[in-house]
Structure formats: C-alpha cells, structure tokens
Image (cartoon, grey):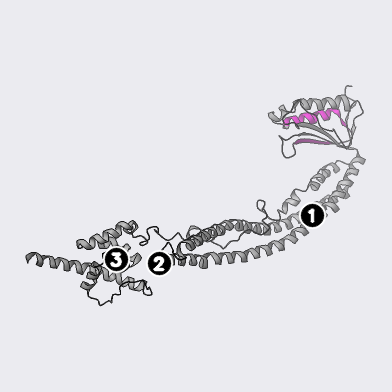
Amino acid sequence: MTSGKQSAPKYLNFSATVVAGLLILLSIRSVVFADSQSSKLDFDQGADPAQVLETVRSREDPKEISELLGKGQSLSLLPTLTSIDLPPELEEILKKIVAENPDSQQGGAGICSKVVRIPADPCVLVPPSPHCQLPSPSSNKKFSKGSVLGPFVDIILNSAVYADAAQFPPLLRMILPPPQQLLNDWDKIDAKRLELLSDAQGLDVEDQELYDDGVALLQVKETIKNRGKILDEQMAAYNEGCLGDSPTYPDDYCDAWREQYNTCVANIHNPEVECSNAKLAAWRRKYAELQPKGDVFRALAKKWEDEQIKPFIQESGKALDEAGITTVRVQAQGDDMPGGGKSVVASFVGPMCVEMGEQLLMDLKDKLTSRELAQRDVALMKAANWMRNVAAPAGGIHGPWAYSGGFHNPDPEPKNARIDVEVKRGHAFLYCPATKK
C-alpha cells in the first residue's frame, strides 16, 4: 500500500508536466493541420489530460506516435519531452523515434531525415543589383576604355594630317619676307582646331556617361544570370522532390520551399529583370541619339583636314621649295622602339652640306639608349659613309627622297632595327666650299 501511494503522486506529477507539453503541442498541430485528413486522433481543448496521456501510452508503434504528435512538430519538441522523467514504456517509444530520426535532436525538418533545411534563398545568395542596372546591349559591343563611340577628342589630337602641317609654320618664318597669307591660313587652322576640340569634349561627356552605363550593364548581367541559374536548379529539385505520386519531402517542407521560391521570383528577380529591360531600352535610345552626333563630328573633322590643312601643306611645300629651304630627317626605327622610333629633323635656307648631315647622325646617336645603339652603331657609320662617299660625289640628293630599306647592323636584333635617312625637300649632302674632297 505504501509503495502504491508513493507511486501515484509520481505518475500524476508526470501527467501534469507531460500533458501540459502535449496540449501545447496538439494545439499547434490543430492549427497547422486543421485541414489535414490524415490525423488519426482529434483532441478537444477540454479533453481530460489523463485520457490524453493514456491514449499516447496505448500506441506502441513509433509511426503512430509520430502521427499523433504531428509530423515536423513532434520531432522538433522531442528533446524537451525526453528530458522529463517519463514512464519507462513511453520513454522507450520516444527513444526509438529519436534513434530513427537523428536530425530531430537538432530540431530537424521532421521524420524525413534526408531533409535538414529549406535550400538557401537565391535572392540572398545573389542579392539584387543596388540600382537596377542593366544586362549588356544586344550588340555585345566590347567597349574601349572609357568610351563607346569615342573618344572624340582623340580624333583631333591624333590627326596625322595636322601633325604633318605643324612642321611648316616655323619653316615658313625662315623665308624673307615670310609668306603672310600662308601663316594666316595656319592661324585659321588652329582656331578651327580649338573649336573642334571644344565640341569633342562635349561629346566625350555624353560618351562617358554611355560608357559608365554600359559597364553597369555588363556587371549586372552576371548577377541576373547567376540568380536565374540557381532558380532553375531549385525548380528542378522541387519538382523532383515535392511533386508526383511519391514525393520525397513532407508537405510542410515543400510549402515553405515553394513560398520562398515564389517570393524571390515575384519580389526580387522578376521586378529587377523588368526594370533592367526598361533601362536597357533607355540605354539603346541614348546610344541611338549619340551615334549620329558622332558621325556629324567625324565629318566636320575630315572636312577640316581636307579643305583647310591639306591645301595648306601643298602651298607651304611650294613656298619652301621656291625659297630653297632644305629639310632632312634621320631616324632610328625597329620593333624595339615602339611609337615611331626616334628622329632628328633640321631645316636650312639653301642646300645642306654633308657635314650637317653627319652632325644629324651624331645628334640621333646621343638620343639612343645603350641597348638601342648596340643594334645600330654600325648602321650609323654606314649612313655617314654613304653621305660623304656616295651622295656628295654625286652632287647631293634632291628631295623629296628617302634611302630605300635603311642602313642595318650585321644580324641585328630585332631584324628590322635600322637607321633611315630622308631628304624631305631641298638639296642635301653637298660638298660645301670648305669641305675637303
């Protein structure tokens, strides 16, 4: 009798503790699975706690226990239930459930032990672009650094025709009296150049904005592409694991997964794609507006060269020839000297003596590095020998003329390392009166 009186309170204490937890659990289940037709039992909130406990104890099959307590909810609360001093028979049943579902010890995803958690949200893995930037334009144009259609300033700054003409004004001023009309024409050429540079700078501002937008397009392209790839993979995995006659994952898991996927697509991915497409259309309009402006500018730059600079070069050359101006250039060339090599140019009123040609070669030698000179030292001596012993005895060289092929060292490195001699105009490499023949 004594032992019976002592055991009854212990059992009741257990009942009061466990059943309170069970009632909380079952109230949760009644909300989550209110529409489920698979529940085996239906407890009212006013049910007798002793009856509830006795019903649980009467289930010997672990699967029935899990169905009674509610799929995912039962296992997530098992650590709490197993920490209570349970009757031996109920404790054994719960131990079996835990043993068969190891994920439940960490609050896992339910009796489906293969599933630990819902896949990561693609909109977290690949966050949206901060400014809804754009995919790349359909032309897939590879932008040069800092420009799309330009840079327009370089069209003027790098004009080879202007660079050729720029050598004439100093030579024209050597003529007495100076040909003022040609010098005035040069001033007009320079004034037009400043005007074109101003226009080019304005176009380059627009072009830079277009370039910056284009860079943003290329950057966001990968963002949208990567997120879309993850979404496609998740859709395939969801269809395989959650649909069909025998789905792998439980309904509550699939519902949460689907809700997360749809939220990412509806709230992040699709709006960003729509916004990006709208901005892409705006980018194309801006490109279409700037392109004809650029074409007009290029036409104006070409007109400047063809109608102002080229006639100036032709007329200046005639004036220099009539005045007897001689211009000679000696130049070091080769693949080891990018950017056009190194040169020395000199002009004189009247013919150029051979000694002056030799001096130009010495001036060029002083401009070479030791490595450049090592591949051209013999070539320099050959050029000087040709001036004194070939050109001068023949009465000099009349320009325009250039020595074909240049002068070379034996077996130079690179193979095209050479010294060039050019008489651009006038009469050069003569024996002068003081020259010893």
Mark 3 vs 1: CB contact within 8 A: no
Mark 2 touches mark 3? (CB < 8 Å): no
Q: Which residue sits at x=43%, y=65%?
A: 254
Please tell me whether mark 1 sits on a helix, a strand or a loop.
Answer: helix
Residue 247 image position (x, y, % from top left): 44, 63
Amino acid beneath label 1: Ala
View extreme (left): residue: 2
Q: Which residues are magenta?
A: 340-366
Residue position marked by numbered label 2 in the rendering: 252
> Percent position (x, y) of residue 112?
38, 60
Q: Where is mark 1, residue-wise?
A: 301
Query: Image point 59% across, 66% down: which residue?
Result: 275
- Disc 3: CA contacts within 10 A as few (<14), some (14-19) or many (>=20): many
Q: CA distance from mark 3 to mark 1?
A: 88 Å
Name the residue nearer the viewer: 36 or 223. 36
Kindly identify the amino acid type of the residue bearing the numbered disc 3.
Ile
Residue 312 percent location from the top left of the image: 86, 48
Q: Position of residue 262 (x, y in %)?
A: 49, 67
Mark 3 vs 1, N-terminal side:
3
Give the residue at mark 3. 65
Query: Mark 2 falls on what kind of element?
Result: helix
* Residue 424 marker: none
CA gap, disc 2 and disc 1: 71 Å
Q: Residues within 10 Å of mark 2 (few under 14, many from 20)?
A: some
